[in-house]
Amino acid sequence: MGMAAIAVALWRYAMRYAPHSPSWFNRDRVVLSNGHACLVQYVMLHLTGYKAMTMDQLKSYSSTRVDKLCPGHPEIEVEGIEVTTGLLGQGIANAVGLAIATKHLGASFNKCDFDIVSNHTWCVCGDACLLEGVALEAISLAGHFKLNNLTLIYDNNQITCDGSIDLTSTEDINAKMRSCGWDVIDVYDGSTDVDDLVQAFNAARSSSEKPTFVNVRTVIAFGSKLAGKAESHSVAFGKEEISAMKSRLGFSPRQSFVVPDEVKEFFSPLPRQGEQATEDWHRQLAKYQDSYPVAAAQFEAQMNGRLSADWKSLIPQQLPQDPIPTRGSTSLIFKPIAAAVPNFIVGTADISGSAGLMWDNKADFQYPELRTQCGMTGSYSGRYIHFGTREHAMVAITNGLAAFAPGAIIPVTSRHVRLHCPLTPLPNSI
């Protein structure tokens, strides 16, 4: 309930998406890293017009129904859910992967007169997410890459399951984020001030150089007798308190699962706006195809997850007869494919030489203006990612890359002899 204003500001005003065309390629992506707060996302999917999220499906939350779309943490199979985030903090890394995907595809296909790929990634996190190592690794990398198309919204209620956050952390989170290369925006009344939140989100979207951290002070269980208390994480309010809350907020305490007409009207423009946005984008894409037919053909193939027709011919027909390490055989088989098929993005955690996944003339994914002491440079169109020694984030970021659109990006990462391909639908040809 403390996140209600964040949800209204994000889904009603800040995000660009199409509830009736949930797989629109250039939609904004939103990730709920604090997945235990999933009910607020399910409610927003219903209110904004996602057809699958009916009122009956909302009632499936925490039920044993086999057809439920409302599990205890959001899952990618549900329309409007971009990734299955799992444990706290991983959603932040997934969001970094989604933002990298946008940067890469935009740099590969956008032209001076066409922004074919221009979506923004939004990620909501809680206090516990920012204690997780996987999140901190990803935050560091996102700042290094200057992913200005990424906004991290901190639901800062200062509460974890065991008690107040100062049981385990007394750090200056804003200073920490700035030191990692992020812009920081503060919102001090995040449970009620929708206008301030909208202004913050609009400023974040317009960032020209850095990812943005929006530190939103909220009150957990806002409006209840457990407001601001750790017990609200897991204790059921009970019928009496629920009735009392409804009365305080102007609802009938005798009614359940009711959306007032004025609320329906408030959200009613969103499906129409979304369809208009998709139509405008498709018209732009048609003009792009006329102006840049070769690039457009490649974009359409990659957008739909199609590999080049001859990719199987790139697999070596013979391997050395003498025993070779696993990474050696992997290198022989995979490098020719990665070099020739643009869908593949490859990365390693500081072991590029021994992993053997670099191909001749490969280009690094990198902030274009970076000039390293070792002389290595790159651009956002590069397809080789140096993750540094960030193994946990590397795998979670990889899942975000794969989730952007099935087969549009097929990420492969390696640490020592372990090769990781994310569990995501791949093209039928594989």
Image (tube, rainbow, N blue to C red):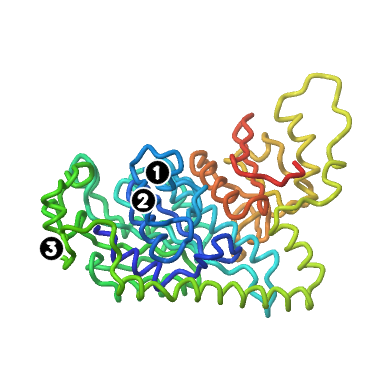
* Quadrant in the picture for the C terminus: top right
**Residue occupying the point 65% across, 62% down:** 105
Q: What residue is disc 3 on? A: 247
| Residue 358 screen position, x and y as percent | 72, 43
Report if the CB atoms under discs 1 and 3 are less than 8 Å apart: no
Q: Which mark is residue 321?
A: none
Q: Earlier in the sequence, mark 2 or mark 3?
A: 2
User: Where residue 401 appears, x then y in whole percent?
Assistant: 58, 51
In the image shown, does 378 or 194 lie closer to the viewer? 194
How far apart marks 1 and 2 lie (CA) works out to: 8 Å
Left or right: 252 with respect to 60? left
Q: CA distance from mark 2 to mark 3?
A: 25 Å
Reading the image, the residue beneath label 1 is: 71
Q: CA distance from mark 1 to mark 3?
A: 29 Å
What residue is rendered at 54% in x and 41% in y?
Answer: 395
Q: Nearer the viewer, residue 215 or 64?
A: 64
Which residue in the protein does label 2 denote?
Answer: 38
